[in-house]
Image (cartoon, coloured by chain):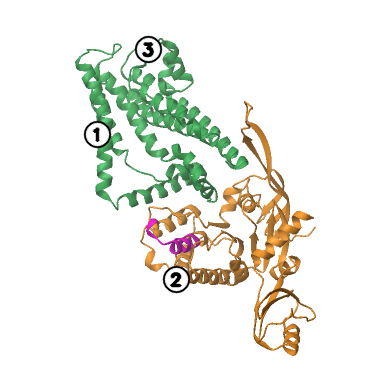
Chain colours: A orange, B green
Amino acid sequence: MSAHQPLIDVHDLERTFVVRRKVAGRRRRTREHVVAVHDLTFSVEAGEMVGYIGANGAGKSTTIKMLTGILVPTGGHVRVAGLDPSRDRVKLARRIGVVFGQRSTLWWDLPLRDSFELLQKMYRIPLPRYRENLERYVELLDLSAQLDTPVRQLSLGQRMRGDITAALLHDPEVLYLDEPTIGLDVVSKGRLREFLRSLNTERGTTLILTTHDLQDIEALCDRVIVIDQGTSVYDGSLAGLHVQGGSTRTLVVDLVDEAAPIDVVGATVRKVEGPRQWLSFPSESSAAPIVAAVAASYDVADLSIQEPEIEEVIRDLYARGRRS
Amino acid sequence: MVEHVGTYGHIAWLWIRAAWQYPTSFVLLAVGNGLITGLDFVGLWIMFSHLERLAGFSLHEVALLYGSASLALGIADTVIGSVERIGTYIRTGRLDQMLTKPVPLLVQVCADQFTLRRLGRITQAAVVFGWACTYVEWTPLRAIVALSMILSGAVVFFGLFVGFSSIQFWTIDATEFANAFTYGGATVTQYPLSIFPKEVLVALTFVIPVAFVNWYPCLYLLGRTDPAGMPEAFQFVSPLAAVLSVALALLVWRSGVRHYTSTGS
């Protein structure tokens, strides 16, 4: 038997909910089974940074709740750090960190420092380690001026950094981040991403990120799991997602004069507007030969390349998944 | 168990410290709380100015009943903290966050927002109880029964509040129904239970065991025979009632948490 066990191991995971619904004309409410997650299988090795993405209601939070032990699965198998999350919830809690982007885990009326101190007690973090971690994260996340401010007076960005510090004080092996950059400005987003990347490389913390912000994914995750209608429809690299999603790059050509649609090998004209033309070509191929071919046969005033939007890629992927 | 009490203490202490950042507001709240509950007893006092005895009990005897129950309730109420608001915690998602912390949920919920605002009630109850105690003819056994009465009473109330609050894991609509038992139970203990028909007394002994909070042990402290003719042994078994009600409450709580984690609502 192999001794190796991935940090997170999910196999045929299933979760159904019983929903009671009132139906017009019937006295009693009817019970309906709603499948939130089904046939979900994936594993995550220690030190990975995984983007877990999907539309609202696709089953993201349900999965995270099962991984953290808040929700008991109705079927299948789930192990995190060798533990059964719902059965060993309290034990697992010491080894994981959870940040819910839209809800703070901090104590609203207490100064940030007190919230951290409370966590030191709850997790029984040895004092030297606690002080070292606090100092480190407060400096890295630039929170030293806010330590004595009650949480309710913090800005959204400060609060988020406070929440992340709170989730890291006990040196978790896995950090679950649910929409960590939601509502933050561009600069704060950038700084936070930089911090998370360094956390992963320096401490080896595994990151599981659910987000709507695909720039988060692009900046942080080598691997993406796309969930749709309760099950995984894609698991692999971000580049691969482009290929599988059949996404295309676009070459925008401004000609000197109006002309008939450009005819070059490897690209198709999608739109013509006066002297400007839009040419699509597959994401995985190089733009160079196409640009060369266009420049050789036409008088070009300007050129630019548009990268595909991941939103579109994922939308295409969903559409395919449903058709097949 | 001991470590959980320790964690509870740490959390509670932080909340007390936080409250002290606004000392005036804290003092006003505590004093106000004491005055409001103090009016309860003034009410009893006024009643006795028109009436020699209530169901055969004099003012200082009723004060003993009132003081001990009120003291036990005050202690329990301070310790259980936010448990009654468990439904709100579920709705706001705070419960989910608590479930990701390595501390049992009940400890976290009870310690959350810990406040000493009930200190006013406890002080007021202690004064009334102390005054009533000066009329008791003390023996060593009576002193032990008195002490165990207050502690067991607090534990019985703790069990009642935790048990009935757990209903919110299944349905939030039942809060009023639960209040009838918890606060209702607390209110009846302020009077001699002999004013009620025997059926009610039986219910208050075996179903909602608030009769053990003060009624039975007080009968012993006052050297009275039970007007309802219940077994004399009941006057000594308050600790047992406390253990049973808290054990039952913890069972209900646990299955409530299990229901929550298996339904997510």
Q: Is residue A283 visible?
A: no
Secondary structure of the residue carrying numbered label 2: helix
Amino acid on which the number 3 mark rests in the picture: Asp
Which is nearer the N-term, disc 3 or disc 1? 1
Residue B215 image offset from top left, x and y in percent? 37, 20
Q: Which residue is mark 3?
A: B226
Q: Are marks 2 and 3 on the same chain?
A: no
Closest to the observer, A253 or B19: A253
Q: Which residue is mark 2?
A: A139
Distance, label 2 to label 3, CA atoms, is 69 Å
Residue in the picture at 35% in, 11% down: B225
Q: Which residue is mark 1?
A: B35
Distance, label 3 to label 1, CA atoms, is 33 Å
The quarter of the displayed image where residue B144 is located: top left
Residue B161 image offset from top left, x and y in percent? 45, 32
Amino acid on which the number 1 mark rests in the picture: Leu
Secondary structure of the residue carrying numbered label 1: helix
Q: Which residues are magenta?
A: A152-165
From the viewer's perspective, tell me whether residue B100 is left or right of residue A238: left
Q: Chain of mark 2?
A: A
